Image: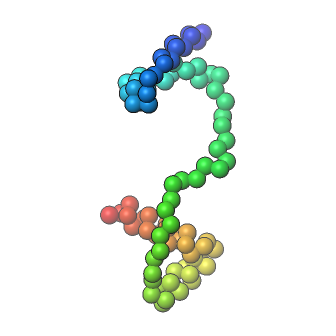
Amino acid sequence: MSRQPESIPVFENEAEEQAFWEANDSSDYIDWTRAKRARLVNLRPSTKSISLRLPIPLLEQIKIAANQRDVPYQSLIKVWLSERVESE
């Protein structure tokens, strides 16, 4: 048998609310058995556009590698950069 969740207090500001949730477990205050799955269809990670100048031969090699993998070359560049940063 599940118990009734506690009432969530009223907060005066966002900092007070943040401090509260950092110190308390949400399972004491929210009835997760009544939760419904949400679909966030337009959610995109924060990104920033940059301009990157590459030597033409290097760009051509990247495009060939991307074509062999059947992915856009920009995506391949992102994957390679991410892997390199992770390995550092």
Q: Toward the viewer: 8 or 34? A: 8
Residue located farthest toward the left when viewing the structure as drawn: 88
Please give left or right for residue 84 compared with residue 42 in the image: left
- Displayed quadrant of residue 73: bottom right
Q: Is residue 20 above or below residue 78?
A: above
In the image, residue 14 lies at what x, y percent? 44, 31
Q: Count up the numbered dots.
A: 0
Above or below, comparing residue 18 to residue 48 in the picture: above
Q: Position of residue 55 (x, y in %)?
A: 45, 87
**Colour scheme employed for the rendering of this structure:** rainbow
Which of the two residues, 60 or 54, is positioned nearer the viewer here?
Answer: 54
Side of 21 relative to 34 (left or right) = left
Image quarter (top left, top right, bottom left or bottom right) of the N terminus: top right
Q: Nearer the viewer, residue 53 or 75?
A: 53
Q: Position of residue 87 (x, y in %)?
A: 36, 63
Q: Residue furthest bottom?
A: 57
| In the rendered image, the vertical position of residue 43 relative to residue 23, given as above or below | below
Q: Is residue 21 visible?
A: no
**Measuring 47% from the left and 74% from the top, which residue is drawn there?**
51
Q: Is residue 77 above or below residue 33?
A: below
Q: Is residue 51 visible?
A: yes
Image location of residue 65, percent across then percent down? 55, 79
Residue 31, quarter of the rendered image = top right
Question: Is 13 or 55 nearer to us in this picture?
Answer: 13
